[in-house]
Amino acid sequence: MPKNSKVVKRELDDEVIESVKDLLSNEDSSDDAFKKSELMVDDQEEKDVDVEEGSDVEDERPAWNSKLQYILAQVGFSVGLGNVWRFPYLCQKNGGGAYLVPYLILLLIIGIPLFFLELAVGQRIRRGSIGVWNYISPKLGGIGFASCVVCFFVALYYNVIIGWSLFYFSQSFQHPLPWDQCPLVKNTSHTFVEPECEKSSATTYYWYREALNISSSLSESGGLNWKMTICLLAAWVMVCLAMIKGIQSSGKIMYFSSLFPYVVLLCFLIRGLLLNGSVDGIRHMFTPKLEIMLEPKVWREAATQVFFALGLGFGGVIAFSSYNKRDNNCHFDAVLVSFINFFTSVLATLVVFAVLGFKANIINEKCVIQNSEKILKLLKMGNLSQDMIPHHINLSSITADDYNLVYDIIQKVKEEQFDSLGLKSCQIEDELNKAVQGTGLAFIAFTEAMTHFPASPFWSVMFFLMLVNLGLGSMFGTIEGIITPIVDTFKVRKEILTVICCLVAFFIGLIFVQRSGNYFVTMFDDYSATLPLLIVVILENIAVIRIYGIDKFMEDLKDMLGFSPSQYYYYMWKYVSPFVLLCLLVASIVQMVLSPPGYNAWIEDTAMEEFHSYPTWGMIVCISLIVLAILPVPIVFMVRRCNLIDDSSGSLASVSYKRGRIIKEPVNLEGDNTSLIHGKSPSEVPSPNFGKNIYRKQTGSPTLDTAPNGRYGIGYLMADMPDMPESDL
């Protein structure tokens, strides 16, 4: 990892400068050009400069305009759609408020330490994921390529979800909302409600039939859904325009895309708390079920959520961090972003269950009215006695509590005949216990609740615009995890690469906007990221802690941060995090093997979902997604192991930074003892160019070894100082 020039003593600097002056004063006076040359030292310490591999040309690496812009970028990447529609579901399913305990524990054990690790290596080495891991060990360079592949797979279907949100956003500018009521079908004789909608609900029908126009199985493609194709194109155009200039363009957009969701969530929370039944939803949400917390499944799902919530392994965290100054306090950033992510999840959970509590209250009221009418009919028919009904209860305007009282009385008196009466228990908890996540929460349950809001179009516009911004923030980090490593490694123009990447992704993404596209989204979501990312992060941990060396890494952190990080991270990185990650990997593999591979297909005739197993070709696709994502790791390892590619051409030289000036250091200091730098023999050094302040050996001058980059750098000037400690280089 690069040695920071800040550790070089001031006295040593003065001696180096004096030695340069002495050297130049003894040069051949006949060479005017050489005499006029001087060692340039840039006083702009904060100017971040970099060097291209194998090149003598220096280039400036882009940098964030402000610390706030960087933090918003990291928050925008880590806070995504999963915080809104995955975390509340897991919280409800796994013990309510008790679920927060394992989540926080695992956030401290694997979340913050691994997030800190990725921030640190990106900021220190100042490369994307490919360059970072190639620098630490060329044999593990495949880790970066694997991250890029996973990012590409995720970007393919993640942008489709943004397209869905754009479609709903565009349809929200009308009153009543188009999913408010079931459509009517007219024929020659009469008008009737659409059967598929009548069997399900208005929002469910609109999602499956009007928006997706979904087919009945994965094998039945049904052709392109042109509405969603246009929305997908719009989503990729937005991403391309935002990313085409890198962080210079996307960074400015972060101010809106990262902050706007919080404005919407706070507005929804305030509005939700004023709705009838919202408190019931929040109370249900955070009522702890301590017995569930002890189940291993809860801890596995909490660990998985922590892992994916912070975007570990994607490369986006490393890419964003690589544009930071080297003295940035990335430890503070890791803790801050991690807890912002956590509190965002809790805020979203409050909003979701306040709204779902309101929705459950409305459904419960309808249930009470319908069953009260049944009781009245049963009383008129003589199936029930009037004596069963308490005198203070009026069945024509009955409350939920009074209905439940009547229900319990009838159930006790008519115990044997009760089932034949057809009465239902109208409990608000029963409705809240119906776990909903993902698209079912965003596009069905939440949209249904918003139809009951006053000024429902306004809230619908706000909600889906929030989803678009949450998705875009995550997409920026995902695309940055692809673009930055490739630009750093292959030196292609970022604008051209961004356009090509977005075009290719759009055309491949057309499989997700077929009528069967939703099933492909489920397939990619289940198989393209989970196992590959776990393996990537485990290898990242091994690369830094075992191969690079945890003691050396801790020294680098002290040099970079200006203080020694807590020993807590030492033990987390070396022992706890690898063990927890391995357990999570094994648990995920077992879960994948035990769970039958398949998807929930929407059946038009029954208006219900039905589980279907993947066909043979579908299983091949699922396995291929996992294999393709992991394949770069063994391929690069074998290529480097067998020396099929020269390591010196693919690895990064060490880089020292002194007052903004770059001096390349050798990767290997073994060999001839006449010079400190032996990256190349003098015959291998390219011809210098006087116009770039590169010095060459003059006739009659002392014999000098040249640095690998073709200039006399600190390597030569310090050759006469054998007692200088290695850490000062």
Image: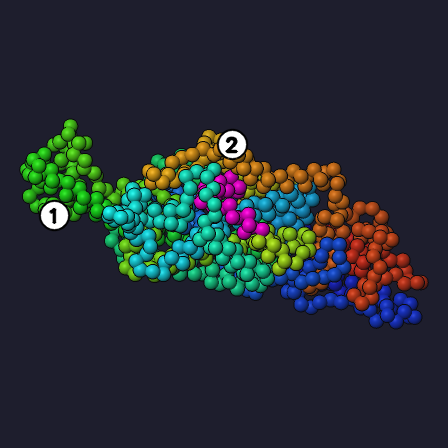
Outermost residue toward the front?
188
| Region in magenta | 504-529
Mark 2 Cα within 10 Å, few/some/many (few <14, many 20+)? few
> Which residue lies under the disc numbered 1?
396
Q: Amino acid at mark 1?
A: Ser
How far across and down, in percent of the image, does residue 20 sit?
81, 65
Label disc, if present, on residue 127 of the rendered structure: none
* Dominant secondary-structure state across the stretch colored magenta: helix
How far across and down, in percent of the image, does residue 662 sit?
72, 60
How far across and down, in percent of the image, does residue 721 sit?
80, 56
Q: Residue at x 39, y 55 (%)?
A: 168
> Which residue lies under the disc numbered 2?
616
Q: Could you say which is closer to the camera, residue 10 or residue 664?
A: 664
Q: Amino acid at mark 2?
A: Thr
Q: Could you say which is closer to the camera, residue 264 or residue 112?
A: 264
Which quadrant is the C terminus positioned in?
A: bottom right
How far across and down, in percent of the image, does residue 520 sit?
48, 42
